[in-house]
Image (cartoon, rainbow, N blue to C red):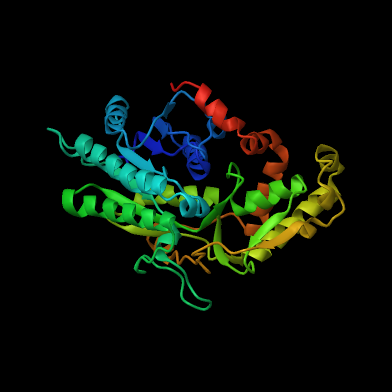
Amino acid sequence: MNPNIKNLLVTGGAGFIGANFVHYWLKKYSGTLVVLDALTYAGNRANLSLVENIKNFHFVQGDIGDIDLTCHLIREHNIDTIVNFAAESHVDRSISGPDIFIETNIVGTHNLLKAARKMWLETESPLIGHRFHHVSTDEVYGTLEAGEPAFTELTAYAPNSPYSASKAASDHLVRAYHQTYGLNVTISHCSNNYGPYQFPEKLIPLVITNILQNQPIPIFGDGKQIRDWLYVDDHSYGLELILTKGVPGQNYNVGDNNEWQNLDIVNLICKKVDDFFLKNTDFQKQYPQAHAAISGKSNSLIRFVKDRPGHDRRYAIDADKAFNALGFRPSEPFDKGINKTIQWYLENTDWWLNILKGNHSKKNQSKRSK
C-alpha cells in the first residue's frame, strides 16, 4: 500500500457506491476513515450500520460545500486522502430539477477542493503525500452508436443531461486544481454499478423491488439502450488501485467490458427472480403479493413508457489503461453478481421498504452525528 495513505475522508459515504467502498476499505485497512454525508434523499445511515461500531470509523452529517467543516475534519483526523463520492446522481431528477445538481456537483466539489488546498498546500509544512480522488461517471463522455469504440480516457467530453454536464464541470475543476495549484488529484470514470444498498429508483433494484411488490416494470422507449455493468465491489477494488498505484493528474476508466441492453437486463432479472421463487418456497410466503413471480411470469410486469429527454443510447468503457497501468481485473462474473444482488434484496426487505416509504429520511434526520 502507498505509505502516504493513512487517514481517509470519504464524502458521500452513506450512498450506494460510497458505502460499499467504506465496507471494502475498512475490511482491509486500519487507518481512520471519516464519512461526510449530507444525508439527502439517497444517503442512508442504514447503509453503514455494519461498520458503525468500528473504532477507526467516524460519521459526520454535513455538506461538502461547508469549507470550515471540511477543514476541521482534515485537521482533527489528520486526513491525507479524500475520496469524493458526494453527488446528485439520478438523471431523471436532473431533468426535472437541475439546480441542486449545479449546487452539489459543481459548487460543492469546488468548495471541497478549496478546503483541501488550504489544509494541504497553504500551510507552513505542505503535505506532500496527499491525494484528492474524484469519482466521476462514464456519462461525461456522452453517447455511443452501435459499433463505435468504447470510451477511453482521451474521449472528448460531450455530456447530454444536466447531471452529466455538472459532473463534467466538476472533473474540469479537479484537473484545474492539479494543473494550477499542484493538488495531487486523480479522477475515475466507471461503468454502471450494481449490488447491495443501491437506491431503488435505479434500474436493477427497481426491477427487483417492483417484482416483489407485483408492480409494473417501466422500460424507457424500446429498451434497447446499452449500458456497461460492473459489480460495486470491483469498483471499490479499482479505486483502491488508483489510490495506491495511480499517478497524480491522471484519469482512469474502470469497467468490465460487460455491455447489456436494458431490456435484456430486465428479462434476465425477471427469469432469475422466478427461479429464486421456484427453488425456495419461503420467498413465496415472504412475498405473497408477488403474484407474477410466484407464477413464474415476472416478465408480464414489463411496461414500455415514453423515453426520457436526452436519453443516451449507449455507454461503453475501455478500461485498458487501468488493466495495464494498475493491474485492475474485475473478479465478479455478471451472472453471479446479479444472483448475489437479487439475494440481498430478497433478504433485506426492511431496508428497501423503508426507502420506498420515506422512513429512511426521517431516521437520517433524527440521528445525531458523532
Q: Is residue 246 visible?
A: no
The N terminus, quarter of image = top left
The x and y percentages for residue 224 are: 62, 69
Q: Nearer the viewer, residue 251 or 223?
A: 223
Judge whether 118 appears above or below 315 on screen: above
Q: Position of residue 151 (x, y in %)?
A: 43, 68
Does residue 72 lie above or below 122 as drawn?
above
Location of residue 360 by image quarter: top right
Furthest-bottom residue in view?
147
Question: With respect to residue 77, does 142 lie above or below?
Answer: below
Of the 4 image quadrants, the one containing the C terminus is top left
* Depth check, front residue: 222 or 183: 222
Question: Residue 119 location, x and y as percent?
Answer: 22, 34
Judged left or right of residue 321, residue 78 is: left
Residue at 38% across, 66% down:
158
Q: Position of residue 244 (x, y in %)?
A: 36, 47
| Residue positioned 28% across, 40% down in the render | 111
In the image shown, does 233 or 331 lie closer to the viewer?
Answer: 233
**Identity of the residue furthest to the left in this view:** 124
Q: Is the residue 222 above or below the residue 7 in the image? A: below
Q: Residue at x 66, y 53 (%)?
A: 338
Residue in the picture at 67% in, 42% down: 344
Which residue is more in the foreground, 337 or 17?
Answer: 17
Is any atom of residue 332 visible in this view?
yes
